[in-house]
Amino acid sequence: MRRSVRACYAGAAGYSYAKSADDVAREHGFDRVARLASNENPRPPSPAALEAAAAALREGNRYPDTRASALVEALRRYHGDYRFVTGAGMDGVIETVIRTVVEPGEKVAVSTPTFSFYALAAGAHGAEVVNIPRREDFSVDPAAFAGAARGAKLAFLCSPNNPTGNSVPPEDVEEILDRMDGLLFLDNAYVDFADTDYRPLMRRHDNLIVGRTMSKLFALAGLRVGYAFVPEWFEPFYHRAATPFALNSVSAAAAAGALADPGPVSEARDHVRRWRERFAGEVPFPVYPSDANFVMIDVAPLTGDEAAERLAAKGVLVRSCTSFPGLGNHYIRVSTGEDWENIRFIEAIRDI
């Protein structure tokens, strides 16, 4: 029966995950491991998020609101009067957007190196994926991107980019939008840690979707809450394509509670910015400038896998970037964790 498995899964490895902290701890004999591989917020969810989630859990016998209306209203209070859709993490939003617009065999463009899930999800829907390389410094050439994406039903651009950390200037994104004949999905998962605001572009372009997440700044990675700013024309079609009840009521309530509690997110943002500067100044390898809650480090002459293994042996879990398409094999990505985790990382990478 194995022949019944689709070719895109039979011969490919799928999404590449970092090692688990428990596995590293057992393998190397640590009580606790510095978890710096998954771009998580090391702090727990805000008290307001926890209280809202507990209240929603008491009604867990009922299906959630199909449109996550309370969360959408909270998003409008937080961001302004835009159109929003939600999903089970940004990944769920990405899959639903692809399902909404892409027919099998149609072209989907991806700016690389970047988050591998765009291509995995598009390929799973039968799309022809076209990778558009960034410049040597990982910046994006707007004219080249738009030209290579011509004819694509959908294109993906991540800013700040995972794993390189750099942002695309809004004026460059606008040039891409003006030149494109399809939809652009702008992944803003890490924009909360940057000084760049792409939201005004939604007022001027009806071919732009801006994806966001509650996993990073708002510390809800385990609850899987994603959302997107969408054009008004697109919203009803997204809902037709969406998996019913994809976003559970506990997660939606926690997200609405977190949006109403500004204190913890302000502290988390300041923490990230402080440690990005320390990594840049204290790590003895080239650290790329970052607008995200992580940094990318060139560990040559080591490979990313070798550096990750040596750091794991010292109780530090980081992400080797060898699985990112279009990126060399000598990079690691390091999240900003708790103070003790970051200090252990700096000490460990100096040792190797």
Image (cartoon, rainbow, N blue to C red):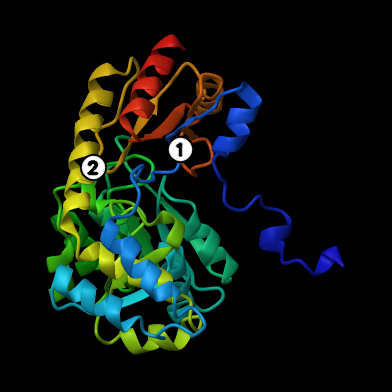
Residue 348 found in image quarter: top left
Q: Position of residue 99 (x, y in %)?
A: 49, 77
Q: Which residue is drawn at 44% across and 50% down?
A: 115
Is the Cβ of the residue at disc 2 closer than 8 Å to that at disc 1? no
Mark on residue 246? none
The amino acid type of the residue labelled 1 equals: Ala
Estimate how packed mark 1 is, as few (under 14), some (14 to 19) or many (20 or more) residues with alpha carbons within 10 Å: many
* 275 relative to 87, above or below: above
Q: Mark 1 falls on what kind of element?
A: loop
Numbered disc in front, either 2 or 1: 1
Query: Mark 1 highlights which residue?
Result: 37
Q: Residue at x 18, y 77 (%)?
A: 82
Mark on residue 291? 2
Closer to the camera in the image, 51 or 169: 51
Q: Which residue is drawn at 71% across and 63% down?
A: 7
Q: Position of residue 260 (x, y in %)?
A: 19, 65
Q: Residue at x 43, y 21 (%)?
A: 299
* 295 relative to 93, above or below: above
Q: Distance between the residues labelled 2 and 1?
A: 17 Å
Q: Which of marks 2 and 1 is nearer the N terminus?
A: 1
Closer to the camera in the image, 314 or 232: 314
The reply to whether residue 151 is in sight is no
Q: Mark 2 falls on what kind of element?
A: loop
Residue 30 found in image quarter: top right
Estimate how packed mark 2 is, as few (under 14), some (14 to 19) or many (20 or more) residues with alpha carbons within 10 Å: many
Q: Position of residue 266 (x, y in %)?
A: 17, 49
Left or right, 305 with respect to 209, comes to right
Left or right, 239 with respect to 139, comes to right
The amino acid type of the residue labelled 2 equals: Asp
As drawn, the residue found furthest toward the right would be 1
* 153 relative to 346, above or below: below
